[in-house]
Image: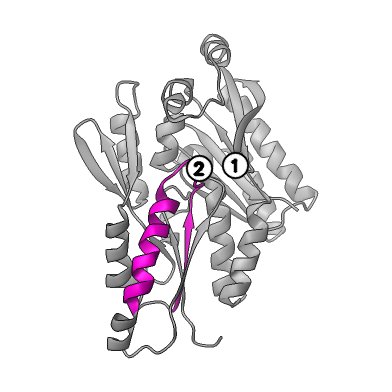
Amino acid sequence: MPGVKIGIVISPTCDVPSNFIGTGRLEMLPVSVYARTNVFLDRRNEEETLRLYRLYLQRHETAIVTQPLKPSQMVDLFLEQWVTRYDRIFVLCPDSRRSKIFANATEASYTVLREYKKLRAEAGLTEPFILRIFDAHILFSGEAVLAFQALRLRDVAHESFDGIRRSLETVRGQIRAYLIPDDLYYVYNIARTRGEESVNWFTYKAGDLLDIKPVLEMAGGETRPIEKIRGFDKALDWSFKHLEALLHENRLSVPVIVLSYGGELDRIRNDPRYQKLFALGQQQKVAVILSVLSLSAGAFVGRGAFSFAYAEK
């Protein structure tokens, strides 16, 4: 429908670069971050995220806890900013089985849909407002694949709201996301307290003694180790070879590969394997996107973890 403005809202768990975020691009539902006695609001600012990594995830003495906004706080954001800025809104939420963002956003949507009419009428807007809360069924870099697809369809293909929704529903089941922790302390000791048991005691101890890094695959709402590789650099090597094969075999259903790293991004940018993958992506018109791993991911897998995701045909 010509003239209809579509908004796309994400949370800081979505591993996109900071320059993807802002008015008219990806809007942000912040998350509260608790570390020791300090409270921060995570808006996915990369410099701030790296600072918190250095302060609180450098050693094992502090656990970071993240909490989504309350439904009432989400309502305020929608009514004060977004219901008059956009006619249609997607809210892309991390897997509802591992995050309360979807539940809180769904609860908030009932109030928003009851109260938006007066605000839009006062702004002279006659187009009905539509809000969709979308469960990504995936986390972190996997969410970013969906966000990229929504942006691409809206801004490049000029797809309709329903067309974008249908595409996201299809792509959601095709996403594979991978996490490689450098420090197994967090994924064993912290993640287990939150119901995540993809690394058992034996893997944790073997990892400590032999420098074994598990490759954790997230797909279909499940997380499981699919490889065990000795040394973080060799795990990176496995990752880049895997991604190169995807490109050579033309197996991507969305033209993007998302990479994220829980540390200074120059470590990845300056790696010849990344540069080779980036160049190959340019040749095949596939975006290779690199960003800082979200604090929510870092709270599970620690500083220095590497993640990548894509959607496969």
Q: Earlier in the sequence, mark 2 or mark 1?
A: 2
Q: Can see residue 243?
A: yes
Q: Position of residue 41 (x, y in %)?
A: 27, 48
**Label 1 secondary element:** loop
Residue drawn at (59%, 77%), measured in percent from left and top?
A: 160
Q: Can see residue 286?
A: no
Residue drawn at (40%, 33%), measured in percent from left and top?
A: 299
Q: Position of residue 133 (x, y in %)?
A: 48, 61
What quarter of the picture does the N terminus occupy?
Answer: bottom right
Residue that protrudes farthest toward the top in the picture: 209
Residue 221 shows which numbered tag? 1
Residue that protrudes farthest toward the right in the picture: 249
Residue 66 shows which numbered tag? none
126 on left or right of 201? left
Q: Position of residue 105 (x, y in %)?
A: 40, 57
Residue drawn at (44%, 86%), measured in percent from left and top?
A: 127
Which residue is denoted by mark 2 in the rendering? Answer: 97
In the image, is residue 279 part of the stretch drawn in magenta? no
The residues bearing labels 2 and 1 have C-alpha atoms spaced at a distance of: 8 Å
User: In the rendered image of this protein, does residue 132 appear above or below residue 88?
Assistant: above
Crowding around mark 1 (Cα neighbors within 10 Å: few <14, some 14 to 19, many 20+) is some
**Label 2 secondary element:** loop
251 on left or right of 197? right
User: In the rendered image of this protein, does residue 249 appear above or below residue 82?
Assistant: above
Range of residues picked out in magenta: 87-116
14 on left or right of 84? right
Which sits in the foreground, 221 or 48? 221
